[in-house]
Image (spheres, grey):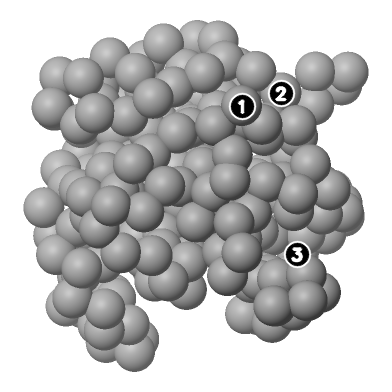
């Protein structure tokens, strides 16, 4: 998977590649999809949610530009796979999931695999202010705008990776990072397709 799907497409951070190799992706996929666990495509995990394709997980992790010991917030725990990759890299991982059933299952899987990840069931739009600031914030569902609370929780020089776009259409994957003056620099990473960002009011 790593050589054919990730390295072949230009990703090269050894910390990311090592984590993608080490994390057993099949543990985050239901029995019905075990044969497809390492394919280069998303898979359903229930409740209208998906586990992202391996390349997108690796891409978002690499452009997050973090290193061992950094503090990272993930919005959208889902199956727990992205959180496991971050934890495998030696990061201090906090992750929020709004769907209680997914949050419980992800926490159990992460615990069984020995990953120390701090989890919360909540509306991720508001982030985790009492644990801020974060060196990196990674959002694994697509809102139609960038949540300001997440921007406010970025550490100076931190990075947020987030897909943004309309529901039911393709979105743009963005890399945001505040400069020394607090201005938010933006870099487009291309077109993606993510499930919609779920809010408590939806």
Q: Which mark is residue 112?
A: none
Circle 3 sits on which residue? Answer: 171
Q: Which residue is at 15% across, 43% downward?
A: 24
Quarter occupied by residue 159: bottom right
Residue 110 drawn at (x, y percent)? 25, 26
Mark 2 Cα within 10 Å, few/some/many (few <14, many 20+)? some
User: Is there CB contact under 8 Å for labels 3 and 2?
Assistant: no
Circle 2 sits on which residue? Answer: 123
Q: Is residue 16 left or right of residue 43?
A: left
Res. 63 in view: yes
Q: Which residue is at 70% across, 78% downward?
A: 179
Pair 1/3: label in front = 1
User: Tag 3's secondary structure?
Assistant: strand
Q: Which mark is residue 130?
A: 1
Q: Earlier in the sequence, mark 3 or mark 2?
A: 2
Q: Which residue is at 21% across, 19% downward?
A: 111
Q: Which residue is at 28% across, 14% downward?
A: 108
Residue 67 drawn at (x, y percent)? 30, 64
Q: Earlier in the sequence, mark 2 or mark 1?
A: 2
Distance (Cα) linking label 3 and label 2: 21 Å
Mark 1 Cα within 10 Å, few/some/many (few <14, many 20+)? few
Residue 106 vertical position relative to residue 100 in the rendered view, above or below: below
User: Tag 2's secondary structure?
Assistant: loop
């Amino acid at each position: 998977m790593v050589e054919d799907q990730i390295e072949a497409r230009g990703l090269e951070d050894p910390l990311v590649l090592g984590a993608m190799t080490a994390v057993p992706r099949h543990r985050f996929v239901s029995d019905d999809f075990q044969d497809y666990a390492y394919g280069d495509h998303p898979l359903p995990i229930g409740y209208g949610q998906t586990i992202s394709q391996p390349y997108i997980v690796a891409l978002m992790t690499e452009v997050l530009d973090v290193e061992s010991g950094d503090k990272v917030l993930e919005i959208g725990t889902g199956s727990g796979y992205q959180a496991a990759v971050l934890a495998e890299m030696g990061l201090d991982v906090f992750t929020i999931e709004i769907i209680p059933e997914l949050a419980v299952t992800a926490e159990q899987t992460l615990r069984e695999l020995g990953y120390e990840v701090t989890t919360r069931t909540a509306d991720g739009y508001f982030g985790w202010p009492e644990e801020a600031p974060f060196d990196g914030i990674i959002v694994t569902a697509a809102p139609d705008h960038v949540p300001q609370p997440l921007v406010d929780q970025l550490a100076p020089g931190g990075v947020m990776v987030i897909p943004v776009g309309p529901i039911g259409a393709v979105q743009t994957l963005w890399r945001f990072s505040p400069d020394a003056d607090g201005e938010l620099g933006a870099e487009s990473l291309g077109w993606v397709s993510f499930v919609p960002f779920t809010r408590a009011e939806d």
